[in-house]
Image (cartoon, grey):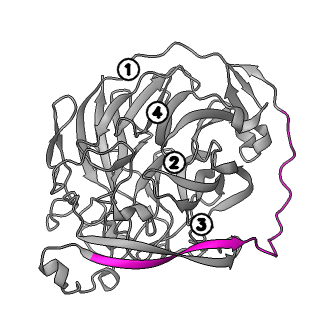
Amino acid sequence: MAKRLLAVVGAVVVGAGALVSSNGAIAEAENDIGEAISTGVGACGTDPAPQHESLVPKTLEVPIAYPVVTVDPGPPVENRERVKTELPTDPCVNPCPDLTDSPAAPPGLAEQLGLPRLIVRPQPFNFAFPDPNPPAVPPGPEPVNPDTEPAPQVPARAVPQVSAVREVAKLTGASSVNRTDKRWQVQGTDLGIMWESKPGEVALAFGDTVGSDFHPPGGMGLDWRSNLLAFSTDTTLADGIQFDHMVSDSRCHAAELLSSKKMDNVEITTIPTSGFAIGDRQYMSYMSIRTWNSLPGTWYTNYGGLAYSDDHGEHWTKDPHAKWDNIFGVSNFQVSAMVPEGEFVYMFGTPNTRLGSIALARVPKAQILNTTAYQYWRDGAWTPVGGSAAATPIVSAPAGELSVRYDAARKVWQMSYLDTGKAALVVRESDSPQGVWSESATTVSATQFPELYGGFIHPWSTGEDLYFTMSTWSDYNVYLMHVALN
């Protein structure tokens, strides 16, 4: 993410203080049960095997904030340009060397001396007056008044048994299985949120992205896009996920889907949090982030919202009414994971930051964009009474980067998230969305991959094979991970 203030310290989780191996190479680490973690390989024989970045950065970018009084410019203009480019099926072939193969800059004095390059970046911190002429908003859906219905919890399942932790492949950036730096000008990105966009196809949404002059830790560099979307029909996950294409706005350039104002303390970015499909319509939950905090793992949102696409992800519309405003910075459902199952879509949510507990809501599939149709799980019942603020936690804090799926084969709910108390990605299971959820089991720990976050489940995982994406702050790219569940 191009403007995250935490890049200067490279810290992303509270409690993840275990910074192992000063050179950052984790070709053969040990997991919590003593089994080897093997790294994946790149797409081409000419590419070097991907290596994790050192925890001692090569470049240190220091943002210097200065106050600016301005006027909120209103909704940002959405980029509607789309270009479909036929790329070589062989990812080793660079389709756009004129765009991606500019000569490397000569080493500076700091690099010659073996010291980190220092970049001081002035950055406005805005104090904005409201837009004096806000755009007209169309009328919202008719309010409804759903009933209160009992929904008791069920006994907790046993703790998932995790073994055979493996880094499968690097999915994004240089030397990745998709060579996104060459094919879509994606040098650094994070998240990798997945859902089944149609039978036999998976969508992958990414967060803040850098396209040139990429210098981790964090998403520092140029050509900043707040979010991207890729699609894949790859069913052989044991060697990674090959992207069929990314939504693009020009030749070899992945498009930003949900635009953002890119104004710190107004709206710095818009980041996807989950996605799902109902019929031919794609939905994406997202958070509008006002500013990143100086405390690691925390930020302030303006709201959590819903967007939809009726052309299979090419263009998206932010619904002006499907929002959960962040009142006093403590509101729930700012970061949401939404899962359709049966007659409902279930919404699991946390406040902004990675430090809150997890709450739950549901809505009939036909009313997804009508916030008055949502029932919140509260003390053993689905109820609209009290709204989102009254929802009872189903999993205690701390939790961040939430990912949930329903395993139809086993009729079991599965949840993955970053537990900042454990400094690890964890998994839980339950026989009902409201729980009781099992105790958490660690899948990957910060002792193995320092500064890790994410943990987004691949929808084609099974009860035995759990595939998920992981990002690290020092690398600022996305990796596919696998664990065996017993």
Q: Where's the N terminus, which quadrant?
A: bottom left
Q: Which residues are magenta?
A: 118-145
Q: Which mark is residue 159?
A: 1
In the displayed structure, 251 sits above or below 460; it is below
Q: Is residue 67 left or right of residue 414?
A: right
The residue at the point 30 percent across, 43 percent down is 481
Amino acid identity at mark 1: Val
Q: Which residue is mark 2?
A: 353
For badge 2, the amino acid type reads: Thr
Residue type at mark 4?
Met
Foreground mark, 1 or 2, reads 2
Secondary structure of residue under mark 1: loop
User: Depth-wise, is mark 3 or mark 1 nearer the camera?
Assistant: 3
Residue 392 coordinates in the image, percent (x, y): 64, 28
Q: Is residue 69 magenta?
A: no
At 85% from the left and 38% from the top, the residue drawn is: 144
Viewer-nearest of discs 3 and 4:
3
